[in-house]
Image (cartoon, rainbow, N blue to C red):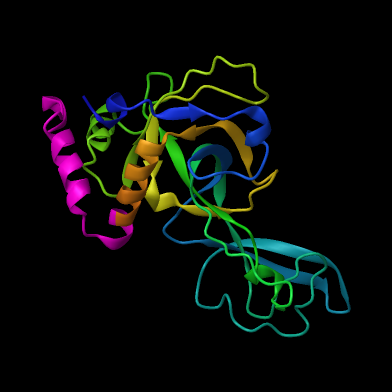
């Protein structure tokens, strides 16, 4: 048996509650970036030095000439809002299910004056990636997934399956997958950045997930986590050892 066999992994949320601000452990859908070794830049240049209404964008690999201070002939560019040392970068992204693992923004006093980006209410989402199947062979291998379910890797955590039987709006079933701590991202907790599912991770699994995340961030397993992992490793299938 593995971790996802010991617990009822998910708990349903009432539809009205699901439409409110996301809670810890809630399942959401959000764009997950495809990380690359080197970012690519969309170099913006005004078509005319006397008008900021038109610009060209040139796709370029990032190099030392980017992110340098621009001349006043290059800026401003209408609607891009680029600063003198800023560039546009490109990323592929895919909408994936994920789990809200943190909502750590503190409210500020109404008397305090702060820039808007200092008071953003973001949540931290750990995306869920698929395990390979005959129809989709690009996911995690079955052997690796078995090892993840026994907590072999610090950067991964197992995600259970959910068969949706309710007729709640936008509710859907989920296949078992892999939660990736190495793909954490910060998301505005509202559409279209985030789509909420009426579903959350159960308290017992969420507590263990947070412990695993702590181990990933700090490197040293706690005694409790080591005990659970040792128990899981004893159940590791022979083909995954």
Residue 126 in view here: yes
Q: Position of residue 7 (x, y in %)?
A: 33, 27
Left-right relation of 237 to 115: left
Magenta stretch holds residue 119: no
- Going by the picture, which residue comes out furthest to the top? 165
Front position in the image: 152 or 123: 123
Residue at x 68% of width, y 24% of height? 169
Residue at x 70% of width, y 75% of height? 115
Q: Position of residue 60 (x, y in %)?
A: 57, 63
Q: Quadrant of residue 59?
A: bottom right
Classify 41 as above or below 143. Answer: below
Type of secondary structure dominating the magenta stretch = helix
Classify 229 as above or below 66. Answer: above
Residue 138 in view here: no
Front position in the image: 22 or 177: 22
Left-right relation of 240 to 124: left
Q: Range of the magenta residues?
A: 215-241
Magenta stretch holds residue 228: yes
Q: Quadrant of residue 76?
A: bottom right
Q: Position of residue 74 (x, y in %)?
A: 75, 78
């Amino acid at each position: 048996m593995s971790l996802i066999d010991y617990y009822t992994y998910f708990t349903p949320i009432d539809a009205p509650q699901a439409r409110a601000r996301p809670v810890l452990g809630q399942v959401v859908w959000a764009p997950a970036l495809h990380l690359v070794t080197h970012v690519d830049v969309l170099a913006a240049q005004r078509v005319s030095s006397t008008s900021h209404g038109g610009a060209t964008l040139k796709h370029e690999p990032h190099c030392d000439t980017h992110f340098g201070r621009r001349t006043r002939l290059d800026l401003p560019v209408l609607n891009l809002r680029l600063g003198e040392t800023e560039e546009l970068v490109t990323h592929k992204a895919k909408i994936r299910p994920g789990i809200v693992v943190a909502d750590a923004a503190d409210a500020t006093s109404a008397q305090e004056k702060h820039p808007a980006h200092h008071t953003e209410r973001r949540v931290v989402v750990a995306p869920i990636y698929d395990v390979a199947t005959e129809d989709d062979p690009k996911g995690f291998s079955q052997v690796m997934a078995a090892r993840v379910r026994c907590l072999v890797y610090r950067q991964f955590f197992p995600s259970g399956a959910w068969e949706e039987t309710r007729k709640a709006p936008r509710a859907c079933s989920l296949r078992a997958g892999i939660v990736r701590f190495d793909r954490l991202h910060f998301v505005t907790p509202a559409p279209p950045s985030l789509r909420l599912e009426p579903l959350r991770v159960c308290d017992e699994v969420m507590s263990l997930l947070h412990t695993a995340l702590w181990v990933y961030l700090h490197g040293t397993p706690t005694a409790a986590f080591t005990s659970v992992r040792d128990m899981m490793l004893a159940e590791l299938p022979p083909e995954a050892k």
